[in-house]
Image: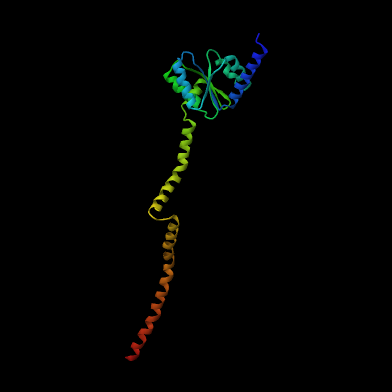
């Protein structure tokens, strides 16, 4: 029978693992049996670069932790060698890194996973792995948002480079529009003066005859 100290240590492990499962945005369980030391090291490095935490876990302790956070569906895959990859910030990273690595290393077997507090199947893990990661999605989003702004910025910069300030553009536009509006008012008096002067010039001619 395990000593009280060992039991306490196991409780702490379960509690810590449960907290990680609860806090993580996603995670994937895999069977790492058959991987060489070199392959395992390569996998760990790839996961670390992606900001994913990776650890070998005991099925019995993981089972307790999973039940504690409501992941009872993981019970069926918690057999044989099991390791867990989790991410606290990127929903896609664990699935993407493991799925890509498994394509070149058939010894790695993906069992199941979880996403946003729900257990997902092997097929769902593979589907998740095929989606763009957070950085790619953000880059596309920012690109679409910044496109009109960047075009405007380039146009304004080109005008400034040619010695035209945005304020000058407004002044020139106002000056160009002003004459066009005043033109009809200036032409009207000229026409009236012509009409008034004409009779005055013709009157003396008829008197002299």
- As drawn, the residue found furthest toward the bottom would be 208
- Colour logic: rainbow
Vertical placement of 204 versus 184: above or below?
A: below
Rendered image quadrant of residue 147:
top left
Residue situated furthest front in the rendering: 5
> Residue 72: x, y in percent?
60, 19
- Can you name the residue that lies furthest to the top here? 1
* Quarter the N terminus occupies: top right
Residue at 44% in and 23% down: 100
State the image coordinates of residue 60 (x, y, percent, origin top left). 59, 14
Tag count: 0
137 or 189, which is in the foreground? Answer: 137
* Picture residue at 36% right of the left edge, 86% below the top: 203
Q: Which quadrant is home to the C terminus?
A: bottom left
Q: Residue 123 or 101: which is nearer the viewer?
A: 101
Could one spot residue 94 in this view of the protein? yes
Which residue is found at the position 38% from the left and 83% from the top?
Answer: 199
* Residue 208 % position (x, y): 33, 91
Is residue 67 among what the camera can see? no
Which residue is pictured at 42% across the width and 74% down the height? 189
Report x, y in % for residue 45: 47, 23
- Residue at the farthest right position: 4
């Amino acid at each position: 029978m395990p000593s009280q100290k060992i039991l306490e240590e196991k409780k702490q492990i379960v509690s810590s693992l449960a907290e990680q499962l609860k806090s993580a945005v996603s995670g994937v369980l895999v069977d790492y049996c058959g991987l060489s030391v070199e392959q395992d090291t390569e996998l760990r490095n790839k996961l670390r670069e992606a900001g994913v935490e990776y650890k070998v876990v005991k099925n019995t302790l993981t089972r307790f932790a999973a039940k504690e956070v409501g992941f009872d569906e993981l019970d069926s895959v918690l057999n044989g060698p099991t390791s867990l990859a989790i991410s606290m910030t990127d929903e896609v990273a664990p699935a993407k890194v493991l799925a890509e690595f498994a394509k070149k290393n058939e010894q790695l077997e993906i069992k199941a996973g979880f996403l946003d507090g729900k257990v997902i199947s092997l097929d769902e893990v593979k589907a998740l792995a095929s989606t763009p990661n957070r950085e790619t999605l953000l880059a596309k989003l920012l690109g679409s948002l910044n496109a009109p702004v960047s075009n405007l910025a380039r146009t304004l910069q080109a005008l400034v480079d040619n010695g035209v300030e945005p304020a000058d553009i407004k002044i020139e536009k106002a000056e160009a529009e002003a004459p066009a509006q005043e033109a009809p008012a200036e032409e009207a008096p000229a026409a009236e003066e012509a009409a008034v002067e004409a009779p005055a010039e013709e009157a003396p001619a008829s008197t002299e005859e």
